[in-house]
Amino acid sequence: MITYALVLAVGLVAGLVSGIVGTGATIILLPVLSLVGLLSCARFIVTGVYQIHGGFRWEHISGWIGLPMSAAAFYLALALMIEDTQRQTVLPLGRRGAARSALESHLRDQVEAIEREAGVRRQL
């Protein structure tokens, strides 16, 4: 029989795995996006612990994690919105590597190696 605690435990594990997998790849290229992902994963896990064990401390910890998560998400959304409307970076997002070169380099630099990629061939 599936119990409520088992469902919540599976949810906690799913939150942990999604947080690790989802932000692990982007932490190097997009640190602000990774911060939002990690904070939301942490809040999801703490809220799950609160739902399983109860107690006001877990609820308060979840709320306190939610504050910087909300601030980081607001900053990320504002920075991306301003960047999209002004076509330039105004608020720094800490982009690195390919994410940075996608914005700063010319299109010909980005598609330079495309002819060597799979599925691209000369005309017959």
Image: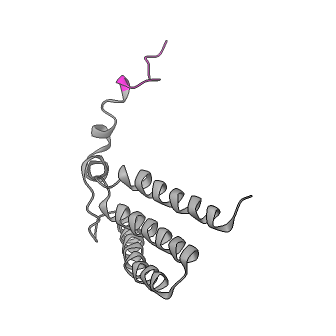
* Closer to us: 61 or 32: 61
Residue 70 drawn at (x, y percent):
43, 78
Query: Can you say whether 64 is above or below 122 in the image?
Result: below
The answer to whether 23 appears left or right of 90 in the picture is right
* Closer to us: 109 or 27: 27
Residue at coordinates 36% horizontally, 52% vertically from top-left?
Answer: 24
Q: Residue pushed farthest right?
A: 1
Q: Residue pushed farthest front?
A: 1
Magenta span dominant secondary structure: loop
Asked where in the image residue 122 lies, by quadrant, the reply is top left
Read off the magenta span: 115-124
User: Is 5 covered by the magenta stretch?
Assistant: no
User: Is 116 covered by the magenta stretch?
Assistant: yes
Residue at coordinates 35% horizontally, 68% vertically from top-left?
Answer: 86
Asked where in the image residue 107 lies, by quadrant, the reply is top left
* Closer to us: 105 or 96: 96
Residue 33 drawn at (x, y percent):
37, 62
* Closer to us: 56 or 71: 56
Number of callouts in the render? 0
Query: Can you say whether 95 is above or below 109 in the image?
Result: below
Looking at the rendered image, the quarter that the N terminus falls into is bottom right
Residue 25 drawn at (x, y percent):
36, 49
The structure's colour scheme is one colour
